[in-house]
Image (tube, rainbow, N blue to C red):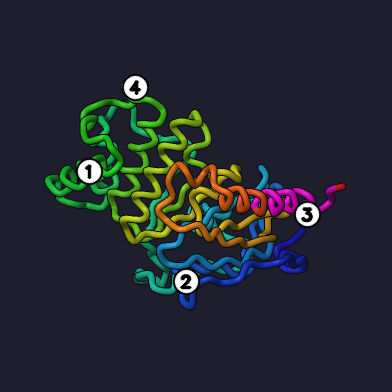
């Protein structure tokens, strides 16, 4: 298969939600050197201050799409545009974004606050401002008392909080999160879901959140974009109409159950739409 073939197959595409999105994907495809077509004809607009989850089975290209949006790889076809981003001298967009990976990826030899200071250090921010902003970010994620703790002294949930603080310290406009809570126990995951929503609701950043979990996506999101695999493509774009803030009682409400049913049906459809599935 060649890159020229990547636009032949079409699928149901999501409707845009904003007149001027913060990021816009058009006809995005990714063909890896081993011949794997990970994405094909992905159209997706993400609006300002939206919380959007990418939901789908393993291998549907959710993480690949997130990495392309982050600039951690190049699309084989299509475009990813940042309408209001600054541009460098070559004309390349320089969006304000941060990425939270599945693993915390902390430096084991550095304290929590020094881990959080790293992006500011790399950006050339003055040392005093680095420390002040890192301390503020740790306070935002509930770790003010653990500035000097090393990763080995922290629980899995606390390590992920440090990772989120490190992403937030640059004050990004867009926060990209690749299944950040997947490895955590359910109680810790619920707590971090709540804390993430509080951060998002109190700020003005956009979140694009990759997950395998219908329940997590319905609790967190304004929109759930469901993807099917072989190749990865969008087949559904669902609004979650529950108001914010969302507390524990939302998880047992009829509205939550109704949205979970719709999302589960979309996920089942995605699994049935894998090309070549029987």
Q: Is residue 76 above or below residue 100?
A: below
Residue under label 2: 21
Label 1 sits on residue: 134
Residue positioned 42% across, 68% down in the render: 92
State if disc 2 and disc 1 touch (CB < 8 Å). Answer: no
Residue linked to disc 3: 273
Pick whichever, 134 or 266, lies toward us: 266
Tell me how far mark 4 sits from mark 3, CA to CA: 43 Å
Q: Residues within 10 Å of mark 2 (few under 14, many from 20)?
A: some
Q: CA distance from mark 3 to mark 2?
A: 28 Å
- When asked about the image quadrant of residue 212, the answer is top right
Mark closest to the chain's N terminus, 4 or 1: 1
Q: From the viewer's side, name the closer residue of 221 and 244.
A: 244
Q: Residue at x 64, y 55 (%)?
A: 226
Q: Residue 193, position in %: x, y?
A: 44, 42
Residue 120 at x, y = what percent? 25, 48
Residue 97 location, x and y as percent? 38, 57
**Farthest-out residue, front:** 254
- Magenta extent: 263-277
Residue 82 position within the rendered picture, expressed as x and y whole percent measured from the top left: 45, 69
- Side (left or right) of 160 relative to 8: left
Name the residue beneath numbered marker 4. Answer: 152
Label 3 – label 1 distance at C-alpha: 45 Å
Look at the picture and state if 165 lies above or below 146. Answer: below
Label 3 or label 2, whichever comes before in sequence order: 2
């Amino acid at each position: 298969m060649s890159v020229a073939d990547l636009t032949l197959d079409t699928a149901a595409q999501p409707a845009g939600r904003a007149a001027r999105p913060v990021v816009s994907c058009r006809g995005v495809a990714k063909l890896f050197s081993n011949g794997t077509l990970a994405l094909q004809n992905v159209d997706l607009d993400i609006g300002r201050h939206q919380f959007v989850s990418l939901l789908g089975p393993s291998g549907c290209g959710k993480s690949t799409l997130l990495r392309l949006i982050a600039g951690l790889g190049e699309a084989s076809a299509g475009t990813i545009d940042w309408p209001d981003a600054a541009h460098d001298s070559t004309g390349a967009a320089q969006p304000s974004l941060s990425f939270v990976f599945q693993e915390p990826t902390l430096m084991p030899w550095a304290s929590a606050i020094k881990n959080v200071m790293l992006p500011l250090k790399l950006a050339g921010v003055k040392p005093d401002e680095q420390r002040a902003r890192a301390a503020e970010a740790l306070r935002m994620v509930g770790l003010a008392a653990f500035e000097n703790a090393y990763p080995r002294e922290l629980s899995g949930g606390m390590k992920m909080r440090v990772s989120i603080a490190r992403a937030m310290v640059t004050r990004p406009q867009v926060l990209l999160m690749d299944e950040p809570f997947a490895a955590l126990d359910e109680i810790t995951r619920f707590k971090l879901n709540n804390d993430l929503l509080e951060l998002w609701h109190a700020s003005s950043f956009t979140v694009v959140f990759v997950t395998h979990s219908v329940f997590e996506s319905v609790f967190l999101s304004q929109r759930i974009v469901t993807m099917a695999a072989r190749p990865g493509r969008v087949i559904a774009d669902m609004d979650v109409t529950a108001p914010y803030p969302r507390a524990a009682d939302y998880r047992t409400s009829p509205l939550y159950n109704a949205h979970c049913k719709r999302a589960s049906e979309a996920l089942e459809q995605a699994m049935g739409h894998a090309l070549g599935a029987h």
